[in-house]
């Protein structure tokens, strides 16, 4: 009898060892040939390899980032990758990274986010019902519109600009004299087609990946905000994992982040010429110092809100 039980237990254990958990991962763009698709696929392939397929990942698109985060909190989606656009409504401390002209360039942004400064921000998601596994990347945001070329802040005055549902971005565009209109990404293209808004702002990777050139004529390389993205897990799923598996999820998130950042770098290298080829008028000679000057009152507000010392620590960060 004991032998049978031992064999059954072995079989059961073996069965458990081979048990498979299916996870859903959602992100906001098409999966094929986009930076979010690269990040999602990078995470999927790494997790399945690292766990010998004990976990399998199904990738889905959902272009409403706020809804995705809400689904993560209630556990109906297991893994989500979104920009920080709506994240500040869930984790207010993260809004500091959305300040315009905060980051010098990609190396600076990636370095800060991967440093203790950025890792401390990831820890602030947990008490808000979100497990933040790693920073990943949306990219430096540029302004597009279909009314006129924009080279200086005065060119923005009066433009109805769609922004993400992000208080920091809305404050900045109000300061520039635009009419910020917050909405989810899922509502953007219809709003541009119907003329509800004149323009929007997004990284080259989003403009390319979602073919926004089909509904926008002008793009100005303002690079006015660096838009981080985050790979997040549902607490209801993640907190049931062993410590060893949680470490594998974090390793997979690091792999996804690298793949997404690499795709952004590739889009940054070829995106301007590609958008010109697709028929957009691209202004690359934007004098960003004029935008920084025009935003000074908003920067004073951000200093009071987030702490001038915390902002300076990010701006002055060096590897
Ligand atoms: O994260 O909403 C936006 O403009 C975001 O950049 C987009 O959803 C990709």
Image (tube, rainbow, N blue to C red):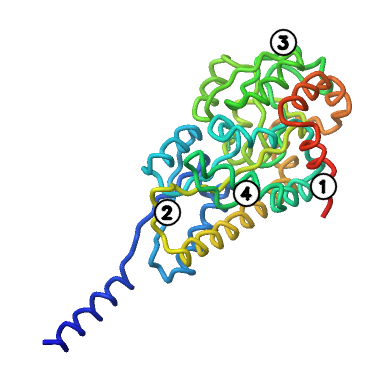
Mark 3 = which residue? 158
In the rendered image, which quarter is residue 11 located in?
bottom left
In the rendered image, which quarter is residue 98 located in?
top right
Nearer the viewer's eye, disc 4 or disc 2?
2
Q: Label 4 to label 2, Cα distance in Å?
A: 20 Å
For image coordinates 38% across by 44% down, the residue present is 75
Q: Are marks 2 and 3 in contact (CB under 8 Å)?
A: no
For marks 3 and 4, the one nearer the N-term is: 4
The vertical placement of 115 against 156, above or below, is below
In the image, ligand 1 is in what quadrant?
A: top right
In the rendered image, which quarter is residue 268 located in?
top right
For marks 2 and 3, the one nearer the N-term is: 3
Query: From the image, which quarter does the N terminus lie in?
Result: bottom left
Nearer the viewer's eye, disc 2 or disc 3?
2
Mark 2 = which residue? 239
For image coordinates 43% across by 64% down, the residue present is 242
Q: Position of residue 111 (x, y in %)?
A: 75, 52
Q: Residue furthest bottom?
A: 3
């Amino acid at each position: 009898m004991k032998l049978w039980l031992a064999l059954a237990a072995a079989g059961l254990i073996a069965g458990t060892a081979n048990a498979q958990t299916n996870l859903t991962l959602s992100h906001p763009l098409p999966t094929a040939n986009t930076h979010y698709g690269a990040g999602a696929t990078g995470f999927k392939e790494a997790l399945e390899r690292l766990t010998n397929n004990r976990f399998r990942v199904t990738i889905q698109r959902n272009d409403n980032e706020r809804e995705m985060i809400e689904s993560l909190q209630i556990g109906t989606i297991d893994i989500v990758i979104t920009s920080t656009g709506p994240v500040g409504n869930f984790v207010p401390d993260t809004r500091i990274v959305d300040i315009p002209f905060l980051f010098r360039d990609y190396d600076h942004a990636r370095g800060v986010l991967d440093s203790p400064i950025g890792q401390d921000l990831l820890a602030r998601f947990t008490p808000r019902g979100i497990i933040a596994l790693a920073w990943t990347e949306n990219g430096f945001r540029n302004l597009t519109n279909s009314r006129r070329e924009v080279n200086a802040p005065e060119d923005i005055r009066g433009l109805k600009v769609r922004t993400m549902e992000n208080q920091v971005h809305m404050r900045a565009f109000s300061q520039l004299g635009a009419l910020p209109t917050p909405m989810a990404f899922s509502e953007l293209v219809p709003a541009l087609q119907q003329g509800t808004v004149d323009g929007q702002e997004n990284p080259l990777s989003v403009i390319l990946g979602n073919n926004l050139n089909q509904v926008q004529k002008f793009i100005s390389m303002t690079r006015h905000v660096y838009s981080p993205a985050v790979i997040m897990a549902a607490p209801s799923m993640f907190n049931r994992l062993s410590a060893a598996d949680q470490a594998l999820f974090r390793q997979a998130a690091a792999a996804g982040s690298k793949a997404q950042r690499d795709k952004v770098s590739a889009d940054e290298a070829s995106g301007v010429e590609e958008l010109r080829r697709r028929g957009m008028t691209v202004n690359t000679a934007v004098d960003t110092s004029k935008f920084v000057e025009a935003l000074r009152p908003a920067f004073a507000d951000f200093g009071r809100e987030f702490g001038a010392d915390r902002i300076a620590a990010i701006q002055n960060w060096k590897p």
